[in-house]
Every structure is written in C-alpha cells, then in structure tokens.
Amino acid sequence: MLKLLRLSPLQRAGLLLAALLASPAAHAQLAYSGPPGATLMQQAKMKLAAGDRAGAAAAYQQAYAAYTSVDDSDGMKAALAGKAAVSGRVAGLAALRPAVGAARPAAPVAAPPAGPAPVAGRLVGGKPVGLFFGTKTVLGHFITMTYYFGPDGVAYENPPGLSVAALAATPARSKGPYSVSGKTLSIAWPGDRKAETAAMNSLTNGFSWSLGSIFSAVGPFQSPSQLVGTFEGGTSTFATAVGQAVVSSTLTFRADGTYQGSGVATVTTATAGSVAETGGTSQQAGHWSLSGWYLTLTDAQGRTTRGIAYPVGTGSQVTLFNYNGMAYQRQ
C-alpha cells in the first residue's frame, strides 16, 4: 500500500484503469431498467438531427443495453453501428495500453511462410469457420477483436498473423478448441481462463454470442484501391475519480502508393483541487502496399510495419477496416 501511495497520479491512473478493465465486473452483463430499445433509437436519431452528437451516442449506448436485456441481437447490432457512426471512433483494446503505459514501437508481423491459405469467414452448418471481426462493449466503451476459427477446430483470439507459424505463435491463453452443439458455441480457453459457452444468435453475415459480442464474417480486400482515402481509429476510456485516456490515429492512403499518418495519446487525471494532462503526438509518412490479408507500411526511415488488414462490411467502397488490432473508419 505504501508503494502505491508513492506513485504519481498518472501512474495510479494507469494502474486503476488496467485493473478496472481486467476486473470480472468489466465482463458482467448488468440488469437493465429503462425505456425500450426502439424508443431510444428514435431519440438518438432526433438528437443527431439536432446536432447533438454526444447525446445521440449516449442514446445509442442505452439502446444497446436495452436490446441486450431482451436478447434482441438485431437491435444490438443496429445500436452498435449507430454509435460507431456517430462517434467516428471504434475502439481497439490494444490501442488503450500505449495511452496508460510506456510507448512501445509496433512489432512487425513476420511474412507468412508457404502453407494453407487463410479462410474467409463464413458459417458452415451453423458453425463459424474462418476470420471474423468482433465487437462488444466494456464499461460503455467499444472493444474490437479479431477471431480466427480454424478449419482444424481451434479458435484464435487476436492472432498475430494468419500463417501456420503465426497461428502457432498466438499466446496459449488466446487459443483453444471450439465446438458448436445446436445453437451453442463453446471455446475451451486453456489455463486460468474460463471456458466460454453461450448461445449463438444468427445475424446478417454473422452472429451474436457471449456478453453481447457481435461477430461479422470478413474476407480480404479485393483491390488496393479500396483503401484509398483517409481513415480514423481510436479509443476513449473513462474511469470515475481517476481520469480519461484517449488514443486516436489517422491514416491517409493515396493512389500513388504513399501514405501519411498521425497519432495523439493523452491521459487526464484529476486529484484534489487539480487536473493534470500528459500525452504526445506522432507523425509519419512513407509508402504502403496491400497484398492479400496483409498491409505493409514503410516510413521515410525504412522502418516497416506489417499486419493483418481486412475490410468490415459489404460494398465496393470500404467504410471500415481493421489493421493491427485497431478499427479505422473512413472520414
């Protein structure tokens, strides 16, 4: 306890935020008492029409809770999509950690060796197979996930890549055998992580599952031209009496193969009679290339970052895509 008291307010904020996200309460589905989801969705649209984006986002969030309480998976998906469109930010859990701890350069993903090609997501006889983009809310904030349901019967959570070697390198607690019985999906996570078993509810191009999570089947980009444009991704996490951590990233891809990126990370902490804010910004530029499931960014110093990238949704123009664990929305 004495050691904790000697920490700075910023360090205490980081520890408390991490503990809050890791606590069992963060994964509990709370009881709901309030207006029905349809009423809240209408309120959200009215607030948006009036220019109140913050109010609309809050109404969509409450609508999600209302739909979750009655297990309305279509309503849950509509509420999540509404909030994502209003806020312009889709959270990636991996993006939170640099905001509350030491900044670390992104580790490049090794090029996949020869082997079976990764499988695009689909449902086969009610069983998920291939790559899926997942979303859920924890303490009112979006978390995005990548799940790969291997044809070998193993589920991988946020794998570092889709090659045989990369899937094998996925941390042990983030992969385990999965099975479907009727409409129930079970993943036997190993070690101290409890197995997850919950009913699957069919959705257009996907399904909903444990703790209100929604999974959408995804495939690779059809053409590099689908990425041309400006995209923004980020996360904002708030803890009562502690502060707020915000991370945002913007990437602009040009048709000539060049890109420009910027990032902002801030942590605001409140103490008795004072408010402290710390953070930083970054700028980068260079060349980009897209090949299959992988996007490669090479900056002006020749440093390369390579990671899984895939579009979310259907249509020729990509409005949302996931890259290295963060979801980006077209601006």
Image (cartoon, rainbow, N blue to C red):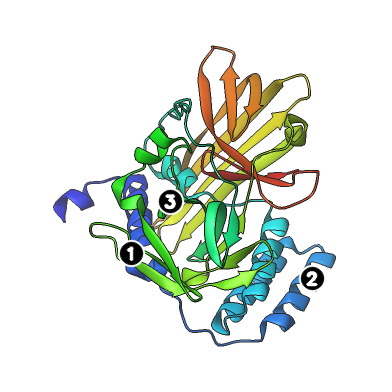
Q: Earlier in the sequence, mark 1 or mark 2?
A: 1
Which element type, helix, strand or loop, lies under badge 2? helix
* Quadrant the N terminus occupies: bottom left
Q: Residue at x 76, y 25 (%)?
A: 254
Amino acid beneath label 2: Lys
Q: Residue at x 61, y 71 (%)?
A: 202
Q: Where does the image place residue 42, in percent across and percent down from the top left?
A: 78, 77
Q: Residue at x 36, y 57 (%)?
A: 177
Q: Where does the image place residue 284, in percent across and percent down from the top left?
A: 60, 22
Amino acid beneath label 3: Glu
Which element type, helix, strand or loop, lies under badge 3? strand
To which quarter of the image does residue 29 belong?
A: bottom left
| Residue at mark 2 | 45
Residue 175 shown left or right of residue 161 in the figure: left
Callout 2: 10 Å neighbours few (<14), some, many (20+)? Answer: some
How far apart are the alpha carbons under marks 2 and 3?
34 Å
- The numbered mark at residue 301 is none
**Discs 2/3, front:** 3
223 or 66, which is in the foreground?
A: 223
Note whether 68 is above or below 157 in the view shown: below
92 or 152, which is in the foreground?
A: 152
186 or 68, which is in the foreground?
A: 186
Amino acid beneath label 1: Ser
Cβ–Cβ under 8 Å for marks 1 and 2: no
Q: Earlier in the sequence, mark 2 or mark 3?
A: 2
| Residue at mark 1 | 23
The residue positioned farthest toward the right in the image shown: 49
Q: Is residue 292 visible?
A: yes
* Quadrant the C terminus occupies: top right
| Residue at mark 3 | 157
Q: Where does the image place residue 214, in percent across and percent down from the top left?
A: 57, 64
